[in-house]
Image (cartoon, helix red, strand yellow):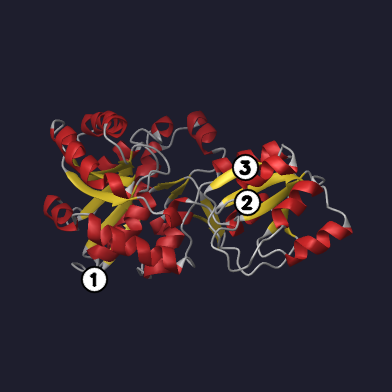
Amino acid sequence: MNTTTPRVFIAATRQNDGKTTTSLGLIAALQQHFPRIGYIKPVGQRFVEIEEQKIDEDSVLMDAVYRLNCPLVDMSPIAVEPDFTRKYLLAANNEALVRRIQTAFDRVAWEKEFVLCEGSGHAGVGSVFDLSNAQVAKILGCKVVIVTQGGIGKPIDEVALNQALFEKEGVQVIGVILNKVHGDKVDYISDFARRGLGRKGLELLGVIPHQRVLSNPTVELICEELQAELLNHPPTMDELVDAVVVGAMGAQNAMRFFKRGVLLITPGDREDIVLAAGTGLEADSPDKMAGIVLTGGLRPSEGVLKVIRTMPIPVLLAREDSYQVASKVHDLTVKTRPNDAQKISLIRDIVAKNVNVKRILEAT
């Protein structure tokens, strides 16, 4: 296997801590030093089918954004299907999987000056089939950067736990990036996190401020997730959802929740709440709600539908009940997609500004 091309492995303390966001920004920053960058996500859990091949979503994203000139199938050599673990436990084929990862890396690294490797979840993810992130980093001969949530105590505790598993495999962790740190706490957290990590022999490589547009779902994303019907034609579906309110109270009491960024979830037959929400809505008002989801598949009467069609906010009709809808919205993972040009531009800027890329290159 190729052992000469510089490489780094981006890990995390848990899923959805910001590995992909960090990787997306790092590739742009690395291209300032190495024009020819390769990317690989050796073990992927969320995939799409392209030409009968199962390709991890993050590999598709990187290829679409950067045109890295790497074979897609090699950027995502192992896709963990629902029965993958069961099959492995019945007939382990670790050597074949390791060879697949090594061969894919060689192809991705061909004529490249640097390769970014992205993990999946915390250091132990994949242990059940003997391909934990720590084991994969060892197979690829990578040093590791750990991405974790902003804070001091809990993130450092989780970093130490992950560091122990990497070190058990003989893999060096070169530093930590804190993600989603609230802007007014960046200096404070940077100071104390640097002290705490230093006691673990780790370097703080960056602190990425929280960005509402990267963390909060849009109404359009929620509509797709719920497979809901759009009952009107609002000016935009890109409003960000800051808070979710379940309208299980009277219309008078519900009105105090009709604020900017609120997604109102209420049964489709609560026409009193729908009409109250629509009262006084102005299309250009910065304080209007993000949208309304009517639940239970209960379609309002024609008179209320006429009012809904004039509303400047999206009104969706979902089949599930209010509890199921609220749970789905709460559990929704906000992922960057190839057509999210504004998000991608922001990610590039904040990573370039807030991550010490030069130090990562020196360490690798």
Disc 1, SS: loop
Residue at 54% across, 32% down: 86
Within-10-Å neighbours for mark 2: few <14, some 14–19, many 20+: some
Q: Which residue type carries mark 1?
A: Pro
- In this figure, which residue is indicated by the disc labeled 1? 35
Within-10-Å neighbours for mark 1: few <14, some 14–19, many 20+: some
Mark 2 to mark 3: distance in Å?
18 Å
Residue at 28% across, 44% down: 185
Give the number of the mark in front: 2 or 3.
3
For residue 338, above or below residue 219: below
Residue 3 picture location, percent across and down: 19, 53
Disc 3, SS: strand
Disc 2, SS: helix
Residue 312 picture location, percent across and down: 66, 65
For marks 2 and 3 on the same chain, the one whose residue lies earlier in the sequence: 2
For marks 2 and 1 on the same chain, the one whose residue lies earlier in the sequence: 1
Q: Residue furthest right?
A: 302
Q: Is residue 246 left or right of residue 168?
A: right
Q: Which mark is drawn over residue 225?
A: 2
Q: Is residue 301 left or right of residue 318?
A: right
Of residues 213 and 344, the one nearer the viewer is: 213
Residue 207 picture location, percent across and down: 25, 48
Mark 2 to mark 1: distance in Å?
37 Å
Q: Which mark is drawn over residue 245?
A: 3
Q: Which residue type carries mark 3?
A: Val
